[in-house]
């Protein structure tokens, strides 16, 4: 894990570059024509999800480390794998890619705001948060997440033929690195993860189910098309676990327990989504 830790900023840069290269500007402008759906998706991802995280951090645990871990994972943008899952779920792929890209672009503002402005009000006893500097954290995230997304979009727009040729390689290699970070965190923090899984596995299960249920209610309130409903649910539930681990390691300190929460949630989210997708599929087949 030492190699992954050492090159973590470059790994995150590469993953976000892949997100940018997967963003088709024409599709993005098509999505903008249906601004309501885009805003609901962004609200779910950037506002509602962190609020759920805050509520769990306040009421579900007294452990400051777990509080930070929960806030950490629920403040991240959606994972690169959400686009693949949206495709498998017959969702709106253009909307999925747009939500992933926009949430990643805005992360240099949203994550520092959540951690430096809001979180200390909830976790006043944690000295790690008190030491964070907004401009330093924001600048680091700007270089690791926002800039590579814009570079990727530029390459996709100006060198479309070249981008098309390497898009599959970038997609698969980004997914590989994403999984490598998650697996690396599991291996390096195995004793901590194993113990935490026994003690907070149920808590994170409830958190994941709460996110799924609340987002389901949200998309049904606005009576969205089925494709868009599935997309927003996937985008909100599937968090960027690798980014949470990297940001946690760079800003909060590796081995502090925060990454264990992210690693457990990263596994839990796929389990819950698979069960949800399976029950929906079964219900459709019975009709």
Image (cartoon, rainbow, N blue to C red):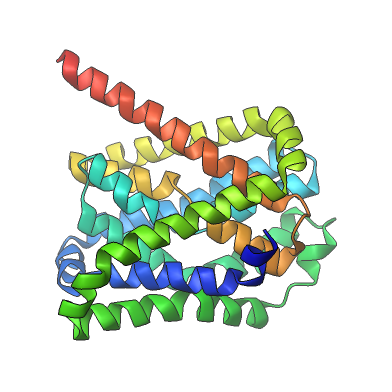
Query: Within the image, what quadrant is residue 130 found in?
Result: bottom right
Residue at x-position 36% and y-position 36%: 216
**Residue 70 seen in the figure:** no
198 to 5, vertically: above or below:
above
Q: Residue furthest bottom?
A: 158
Taking depth in this image into account, of 34 and 208 the one nearest to the observer is 208
Query: Within the image, what quadrant is residue 102 found in?
Result: bottom left
Residue 21 locus on image (x, y percent) = 30, 72
Residue at x-position 81% and y-position 58%: 124
* In-image side of 231 versus 212 (left or right): left
* In-image side of 107 versus 7 (left or right): left
Q: In what quadrant of the picture does the N terminus appear?
A: bottom right
Q: In what quadrant of the picture does the C terminus appear?
A: top left
Query: Within the image, what quadrant is residue 58 found in?
Result: top right
Residue 229 locus on image (x, y percent) = 26, 42
* In-image side of 89 versus 66 (left or right): left
Taking depth in this image into account, of 159 and 72 the one nearest to the observer is 159
**Residue 262 seen in the figure:** yes
265 to 142, vertically: above or below:
above
């Amino acid at each position: 894990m030492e190699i992954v830790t050492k090159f973590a900023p470059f790994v995150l840069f590469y993953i976000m570059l892949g997100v940018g290269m997967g963003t088709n500007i024409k599709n993005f402008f098509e999505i903008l024509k249906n601004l309501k759906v885009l805003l609901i998706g962004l609200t779910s991802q950037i506002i509602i999800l962190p609020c759920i995280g805050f509520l769990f951090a306040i009421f579900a645990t007294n452990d400051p480390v777990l509080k930070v871990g929960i806030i950490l994972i629920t403040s991240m943008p959606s994972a690169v794998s959400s686009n693949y899952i949206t495709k498998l779920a017959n969702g709106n792929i253009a909307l999925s890619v747009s939500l992933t890209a926009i949430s990643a672009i805005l992360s240099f503002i949203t994550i520092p705001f959540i951690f430096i402005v809001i979180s200390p009000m909830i976790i006043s006893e944690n000295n790690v948060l008190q030491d964070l500097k907004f401009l330093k954290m924001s600048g680091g995230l700007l270089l690791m997440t926002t800039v590579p997304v814009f570079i990727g979009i530029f390459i996709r727009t100006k060198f479309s033929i070249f981008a098309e040729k390497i898009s599959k390689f970038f997609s698969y290699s980004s997914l590989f690195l994403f999984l490598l970070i998650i697996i690396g965190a599991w291996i390096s923090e195995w004793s901590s993860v194993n113990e935490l899984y026994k003690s907070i596995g149920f808590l994170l299960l409830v958190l994941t189910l709460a996110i799924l249920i609340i987002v389901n209610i949200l998309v049904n309130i606005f009576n969205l098309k089925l494709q868009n409903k599935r997309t927003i649910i996937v985008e909100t539930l599937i968090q960027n676990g690798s980014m949470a681990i990297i940001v946690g390691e760079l800003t909060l300190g590796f081995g502090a327990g925060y990454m264990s929460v992210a690693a457990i949630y990263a596994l839990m989210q796929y389990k819950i989504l698979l069960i949800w997708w399976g029950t929906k599929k079964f219900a459709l087949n019975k009709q």
